[in-house]
Image (cartoon, helix red, strand yellow):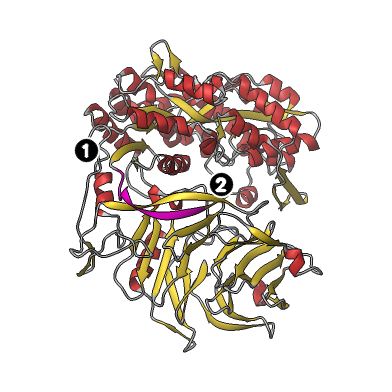
Amino acid sequence: MRRKGRLTAFLLAFALVFSAAGCGSVGNTGGEKQTGNTQESASAQPVKTGVQESPEGSVTSMGRYMESSFALPQDAGVLGRTMSLLGDGRLAYFDDKAGIWFSEDQGKSWKDQKTLAEFFPDREVKYVDTAAIAPDGSIAVGDHNYETDEAAVLYAGADGTASIINAALEDGDWVHKLFFGPDGRLYGSSLRGRVYAVDTREQSLKLLFTAAQSPEMLAFTGKLLLALEEGGVEIYNLETGAQQEGDTVLDDFCREYLSGRLGGNSDCVGAYLFGADEGICYLACREGLYRHVLGGNVMEQLIEGSLSSFGDPSIGICGVALLESGEFLLLHTGDNLVCFTYDPNEPTIPEKLLRIYSLEENGRLRQAISAYQKQYPDVYVSYEAGMPQESAVTRMDALKNLNLALMGGNGPDVLLLDGIDGNIYAEKGLLKDLGKLLEEVASDQDVFANIVHTYQTEKGTFMAPAGFTLPLIVGKEEDIRSVTDLASLADAVEKYAGNLVNSTVTGAKSPEQELAQLLSVCSPAWLSGKELNQEALAEFLVQAKRMYDVDKTGLTPEFVERFGNYNGAAPLGTRTDDIAVGTGKMAFGLAAMMLLDIGGVGHFMEEEEGYAFGLWAGQDGPGFVPTDKLAICAQTQCSVEAENFVRLFFSGEVQEVYSSDAFPVNRAAFDKLCEWQDQWIGGSFKGPDGEVEFGNGWPGAETTKRFKELVEQADHCLEGNKVLEEAVMKVGPSVLTGGMSVEEGVRAIQKEVAIYLSEQG
């Protein structure tokens, strides 16, 4: 049970991350949950909801909701995906692609399909941005024409009646979310927070109130309408027609856990609120499923997010329902409907503890943890990020803490080494040889061997990347052929000197950006063992300054204001767009996304002649940049559990979620990512010569074939040192702008990293 914190046992589990070596037991805990100045005790025994108070009022150590899954109806889509328990006990499902289906066995099988066209044969539905199903089987769909800004609520009653209600409001607002109350009445909320009662017979909207924020959803319990928002839950009394005082506990929970998570998707919600008996509601989010009595002082956790699909970051919630049996159904954006059934014989918290660590928060790691927990329910996975988001912990501090834990024998079981020099730990004997495990992975999964085995040495393979990005260069064919290293890249840039007006050659609009976009193919050359390679570092600053001296001649105040003085490395696809619209001459960077990067390059190649793309060589030659580098600590007493986790990370289940910032090493997942999809991103801007349109579509077969060939050729690992890169980004801009000489810059950088390098011996 939790109020705004975690179960006592979970706090203990997190405390154990670096306090006990090996695969430990989380242990049995008991006690009371405390809120404010009062205490409310409960146990985990189920009565419908899965919670029952024991005579002593203690929390038992046994009992947990376990998952099973059922297939969704045939040809299920995502837009408008929703479900509802009907008054006759059936389960109804709808999305704009599959239509409405019914199940008499709580989702195990489906029948009686009806399509949207059957309800509205004379209407061409443009875009379904919301849908809801009433207890009697009536359905309401929000249809939005984004080209004309027309919006309508399409209502099909269970009695065969149908109506179309205008949902377009003043100021470009529209009703974009629909919900049925338990009495079958329809309600809607607008983008700007207006909450309406929808009269399907009179085909009209009645404004009830305007919420402080745009509600994520509406829920109902008794006579109360609840509007879920990031800042809390607004409560409207349908009987009196007035808003009433909010629920402090519910509001506090929303502010603490839902901030920044709501309103981000059209096909799912960041949290799901629904009512049950009068005065009782349930709230599902990434942290799990909670029960709350309005006016009470407890958010009662029924299902822990980290032990269930609720905590899976790769899916979004579309609906949650409580069955008469006490089971819960979760409808999400994945391929299955999940059923949670209470098992009194399962430990509330798994006794085995597997500890996983990464320097920074990693979404794919969390997805892998969620998949692992479902596959191995007898293991509790504790995950810690050394530099939590919005924390004051520096990289140096986090590395020191990790080093102390590893040297003291209290380290984690599995390490994600992104941003960490794993070679140092391998040399000290702190990492386990993964050679045999990787052979098993290669026999089970077809992988890019040139990437997976990049860290293989005579002594063994102590880490392996599960993903990668690929440094590519795009430009005129003669420029691409001429670039073989950093100096020749600077030569190619200088060819365009004196011919820049409101444009740059490389896309860099600040000295920081010039440096940032060169780091990935150059920083691996700056260390010789554990010593700073001053000659290579000086060469980097010299060539970077040559390029910035050219780029800055095209930077007018108007140009910088229009396109922004961005200091980071822009995506490769964005830089390719610069060439397409005439604000850049060549693009180089890390290809990390199929649509934005490879799609941008491919689309440009189709439109322009005389251009090419290939591997981008810097100071360390052409190659790939590894991501998601996995290692197992030699001291672990959870070898089997740790190896199972690493093995799962290379599987298609996890590898297929790669889409935003890296590519998978699993060939099947990579090939699936290369399959053409009907997606497009683009826009327009007012350039020096008028309105210019640009856009990227999914790459075609020719582009993806060429890209795959380059992946096969990239047999050299380009792994820089983040501490050294941060020092260069701190000092380097002064060198590029003439504030200090190259020699002074090298000395300043050396001073910045001296302590760090001395500690690596």
Q: Quadrant of residue 461?
A: top left
Residue beneath label 2, please? 565
Q: Nearer the viewer, residue 618 or 713?
A: 713
Residue 595 on image: x %, y %: 66, 41
Point 54% across, 80% down: residue: 183
Q: Quadrant of residue 409?
A: top left
The quarter of the image holding the C terminus is: top left
Q: Nearer the viewer, residue 563 or 678?
A: 678
Q: Which mark is residue 662?
A: none
User: What secondary structure is marked by label 2?
Assistant: loop
Residue 141 on image: x %, y %: 66, 68
Please report the bounds of the magenta region as a residue range.
338-350
Residue beneath label 1, please? 19
650 to 35, vertically: above or below? above
Q: Is residue 174 visible?
A: no
Q: Nearer the viewer, residue 18 or 76?
A: 76
